[in-house]
Amino acid sequence: MPTEDRSTWSDDRVKKDHAMWTEIIGGGRVLTKDQQDRFDKTRDEVDKRGIIPVSGQG
C-alpha cells in the first residue's frame, strides 16, 4: 500500500499525525516497516514545511 502524499495535507493535520506517531513511539511500541515509513513521511513533511509539531505533553 503506497504511503499517502502528505504535501496535500493541512499543517494542522500534519501536526496531529506527527503527535500521534510520537505518542505511539514514546509509549514504547515498535513500529512495523509500513508504520515506520508512514511516520518518516510525516516527519519529512514537518521538516520541509518548517512547522513545529504539537506536543502530546500539553
Image (spheres, rainbow, N blue to C red):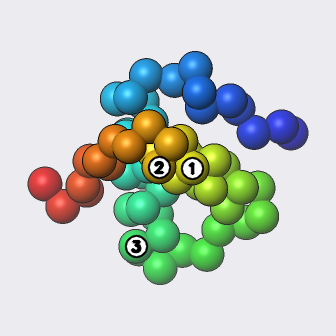
Label 2 vs label 1: CA separation? Answer: 5 Å
Q: In which quarter of the image is the N terminus?
A: top right
Label 3 vs label 1: CA separation? Answer: 19 Å
- Provide residue 8's location: percent of width, then percent of height: 58, 20
Crowdedness of circle 2 by 10 Å Cα count: few (<14), some, many (20+)? few
**Left or right placement of residue 32 versus residue 26 in this view:** right
> Which residue is the site of mark 2?
47
Residue drawn where x is 54% and y is 74% of the image: 29
Residue drawn where x is 44% and y is 37% of the image: 49
Assign a secondary structure to mark 2: helix
- Provide residue 57's location: percent of width, then percent of height: 18, 61
Residue drawn where x is 51% and y is 23% of the image: 9
Confirm or deny contact between disc 2 and disc 1 (CB under 8 A).
Answer: yes
In the rendered structure, find residue 26 and report the number of the disc placed on it. 3
Assign a secondary structure to mark 3: helix
Q: Which amino acid does label 1 sit on?
A: Asp
Q: What residue type is labelled 2?
A: Asp
- Whether residue 14 can be seen here: yes
Residue drawn where x is 73% and y is 66% of the image: 32
Answer with mark 2 or mark 3, whichever residue precedes in sequence: 3
Q: Which amino acid does label 3 sit on?
A: Gly
> Which residue is the site of mark 1?
44
